[in-house]
Image (cartoon, helix red, strand yellow):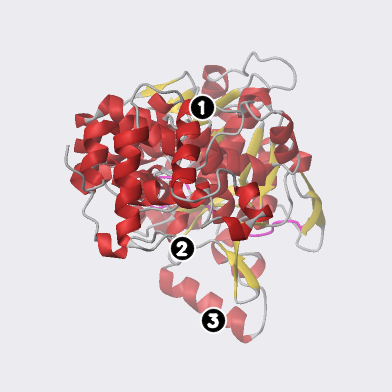
């Protein structure tokens, strides 16, 4: 039996050979230096922060070189798949502006000529490549049951040998074609394994784009390439897909570094040029004085849904990821505060080869700065979108008082250094609740007027201001002059400095008077500009808040 006949027997009904697919998927016509990379998740759950970090870097590297970024779904392990897993991945990434030039659009649609981009739909392609290896005597059928493989592992552990299917432990490697055919004809189930040409005592060198030169033993494991269901293992699909989709750079988590000898060997046995590998270190968390990987199980901030629920802008998350990804991004951002990430040139050499410490406070700070630079209308629209999903009561108020709400968000916004009251959109209601009568239910006995404590004096200050000094038409400078006059009328210094220089001559200063007006109106001692708040309230609502007759 020839190798060709053997391959046809082991993998029958494969319509096309390997050369057919080489012609079908030509090399991409891109400029020199263009990076073609992919995000290749399994549809097994939500997109987490580590995955978003990898996808962000992959997209950035492709886009800045006028390359291609595509989405491939690795779904050959059907047992782990979750319902609507693909659509969940696409949606979560789109929410963060991570879009693709090619690949899966949803469960049924794709774009691009290098598909199918879902691995379970590429079975014939993988089998054509596996047949080639069999024809070259570089792959063979293996018959061990799970129990037999377990016995091999237990023996290896007992004699303290390396664990795996290699050398003399690879018993199926030594069957003749005739013996193997006979077993199959008698109903023995089988898988296809690589006949590894590697020598564990020799070294290979991985020139990693992030970690630099890494030396590792050659692979000598006869890994599974085609499973009993005819679908490939991750390793073999990786080889076929990245070759035919013409991937130039495989950017992935560094848990895959140990698999690099297998992947490089697979490219080698086919005579293909391997892509460049760039292994990203995980995001780390400090706990009890030690560092550990950010965990999907332990850390709620690992899920991207955590940030949506908080109302943290996606742009702030991406700014943070850029800060983590390249050590020089923060300096660039300081020099270009209105610059966009797309304007920044990311460099593999600036990506930390060791794990970066995850900093939630940094994300919140970036979020606060980002929101402070938005127009009031944008704060309103984004805040409303958040509230419609997570706080219907607040959403109703925002819709009922649209222009009024925009006016609130506009206070002290159009300045060189705008206020930074809102850390995230879930913060809006907590910061401005007192501006809405529907949310205003204070206990006035708890008001902290600070230096002025006499209820009679407080009442007189409020009534005098409204009757004698308040005007809806005045500008801020005139308003502030009236505030000084009010302070003087009650024996308080017109200026804080004046009081500090002559404390015995005054009961206090203008700040004490304005505090009474502020607290009685809002309950809070710290608010945005009091003049702007009063303008938004108007006379009637102020009189009501101050407990005065209209």
Instruction: Point out the stretch of residues depicted in magenta.
Output: 217-232
Closer to the camera: disc 1 or disc 2? 1
Q: Is residue 271 visible?
A: no
Q: Earlier in the sequence, mark 2 or mark 3?
A: 3
* 239 falls in the magenta region: no
> Residue at 65% of width from left, 55% of height from top?
502
> Residue at 66% of width from left, 34% of height from top?
249
The numbered dot on residue 84 is: none
Q: Nearer the viewer, residue 72 or 173?
A: 72
Above/below status of 343 relative to 272: above
Above/below status of 464 relative to 346: below
Give the residue pinned by disc 3: 154
Closer to the camera: disc 2 or disc 3? 2
How would you classify the magenta stretch by its main secondary structure? loop
Closer to the camera: disc 3 or disc 1? 1
Residue 33, image x, y percentages: 74, 22
Provide the secondary structure element on which disc 3 rests.
helix
> Residue at 65% of width from left, 48% of height from top?
497
Give the residue pinned by disc 2: 299
* 226 falls in the magenta region: yes
Q: Nearer the viewer, residue 212 or 262?
A: 212
Q: Nearer the viewer, residue 358 or 35?
A: 358
Residue 150, image x, y percentages: 48, 75
Q: CA distance from mark 1 to mark 2?
A: 51 Å
Give the residue pinned by disc 1: 477
């Amino acid at each position: 039996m020839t190798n060709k006949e053997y391959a046809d027997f082991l993998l029958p009904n494969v319509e096309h050979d390997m050369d057919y697919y080489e012609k079908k998927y030509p090399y991409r016509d891109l400029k020199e230096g263009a990076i073609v990379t992919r995000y290749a998740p399994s549809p097994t759950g939500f997109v987490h922060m580590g995955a978003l970090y990898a996808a962000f870097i992959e997209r950035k590297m492709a886009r800045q070189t006028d390359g291609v970024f595509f989405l491939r779904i690795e779904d050959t392990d059907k047992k782990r798949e979750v319902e609507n897993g693909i659509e969940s991945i696409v949606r979560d990434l789109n929410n963060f502006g991570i879009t693709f030039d090619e690949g899966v659009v949803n469960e049924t649609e794709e774009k691009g000529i290098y598909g199918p981009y879902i691995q379970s739909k590429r079975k014939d392609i993988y089998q054509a490549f596996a047949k080639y290896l069999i024809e070259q005597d570089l792959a063979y059928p293996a018959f061990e049951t799970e129990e037999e493989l377990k016995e091999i592992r237990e023996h290896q552990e007992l004699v303290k040998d390396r664990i795996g299917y290699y050398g003399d432990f690879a018993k199926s490697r030594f069957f003749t074609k005739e013996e193997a055919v006979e077993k199959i004809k008698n109903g023995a189930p089988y898988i296809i394994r690589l006949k590894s040409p590697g020598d564990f005592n020799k070294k290979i060198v991985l020139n990693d784009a992030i970690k630099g030169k890494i030396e590792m033993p050659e692979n000598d494991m006869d890994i599974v390439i085609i499973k009993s269901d005819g679908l490939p293992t991750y390793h073999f699909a990786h080889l076929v897909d990245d070759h035919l989709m013409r991937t130039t750079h495989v950017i992935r988590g560094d848990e895959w570094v140990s698999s690099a000898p297998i992947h490089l060997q697979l490219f080698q046995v086919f005579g293909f040029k391997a892509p460049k590998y760039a292994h990203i270190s995980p995001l780390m968390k400090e706990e009890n004085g030690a560092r550990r990987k950010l965990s999907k199980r332990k850390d709620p901030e690992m899920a991207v849904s955590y940030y949506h629920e908080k109302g943290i802008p996606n742009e702030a998350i991406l700014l943070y990821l850029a800060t983590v990804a390249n050590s020089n991004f923060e300096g660039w951002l300081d020099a270009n505060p209105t610059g966009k990430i797309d304007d920044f040139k990311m460099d593999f050499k600036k990506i930390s080869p060791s794990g970066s410490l995850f900093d939630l406070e940094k994300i919140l700070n970036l979020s606060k700065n980002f929101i402070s630079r938005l127009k009031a209308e944008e704060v309103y629209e984004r805040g409303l979108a958040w509230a419609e999903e997570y706080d219907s009561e607040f959403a109703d108020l925002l819709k009922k008082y649209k222009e009024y709400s925009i006016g609130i968000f506009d206070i002290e916004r159009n300045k060189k250094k705008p206020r930074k009251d809102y850390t995230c959109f879930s913060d809006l209601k907590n910061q401005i609740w007192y501006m809405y009568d529907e949310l205003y239910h204070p206990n006035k006995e708890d008001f902290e007027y600070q230096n002025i404590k006499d209820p009679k004096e407080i009442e007189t200050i409020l009534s005098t201001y409204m009757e004698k000094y308040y005007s809806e038409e005045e500008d801020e400078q005139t308003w502030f002059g009236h505030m000084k006059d009010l302070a003087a009328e009650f024996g308080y210094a017109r200026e804080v400095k004046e009081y500090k220089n002559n404390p015995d001559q005054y009961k206090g200063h203008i700040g004490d008077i304005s505090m009474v007006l502020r607290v009685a109106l809002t309950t809070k001692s710290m608010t945005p500009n009091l003049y702007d708040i009063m303008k938004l309230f108007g006379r009637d609502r102020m009189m009501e808040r101050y407990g005065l007759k209209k």
